[in-house]
Image: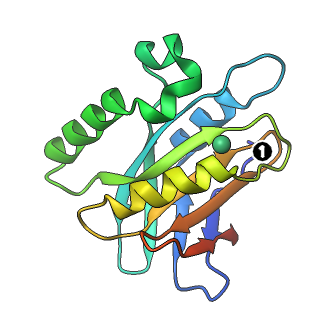
Amino acid sequence: MRHVSDWSLPDGSVLLNFSDNVRGVFERNVQSGDLPESGGVLLGTVHERGLLVTVATTPTRLDRQLRYLFERLPFGHRAVAKRLWRSTGGTTRYIGEWHTHPQDIPTPSAIDLEEWRKLAKARADKRPLLAVIVGRHSLHVELTHGNGRRQLLRPY
Ligand SMILES: [Zn+2]
């Protein structure tokens, strides 16, 4: 698979792992050719120093019909998140968001940054939002805080 599984903050304070399952979802949705933009929510488990991302939801039918607006229609994805959170006794929880860009090395747009900040601010647990963009060659991975602070993660 082309995308790196292990990421960290430069100071090593946060380690992040994308499961094979999650990287498979990214891989299948890489925007090459005329594949539309795609995305969903990221779920996983939170540990003292790390995040294990174990589930990436994929676009629902509603998203596909309105594919350019999917970031504003996260209802189906929230339902999946809620169900998993319940069925795992609260260990698998919402961690963040992912979407694709038709760029080799993806960079967030101004709209992406604004959306992420809003989502981070809305989090009840006050944790930063994990924001991922899936490019054709690499991933953009960052933690966005409700106050607008951003922390870029690097391949580990
Ligand atoms: Zn974007």
Q: Residue at x 55, y 55 (%)?
A: 114
Q: Return the residue at label 1.
A: 2
Q: In the picture, which quadrant includes the C terminus?
A: bottom right
Most distant residue in the bottom direction: 11
Tell me: 127 left or right of 31: left
How many other residues sit within 10 Å of disc 1, few (<14), some (14-19) or many (≥20)?
Answer: few
Left or right of 73 in this view: 4:
right
Percent across and percent down for residue 130 are 49, 59
Query: Front-most of 24 and 96?
Result: 96
Residue 18 placement, left or right of 123 = right
Image quadrant of residue 95? bottom left
Quadrant of the image containing the N terminus:
top right
The answer to whether residue 79 is left or right of residue 36 is left
For residue 63, above or below residue 95: above
In the rendered image, the vertical position of residue 3 relative to residue 155, given as above or below: above
Task: Tell me if I can see residue 18 in this picture.
Answer: no
Asked whether the viewer can see residue 101, the reply is: yes
Q: Which residue does the image show at 51% across and 71% down from the upper left?
A: 148
- Identity of the amino acid at label 1? Arg
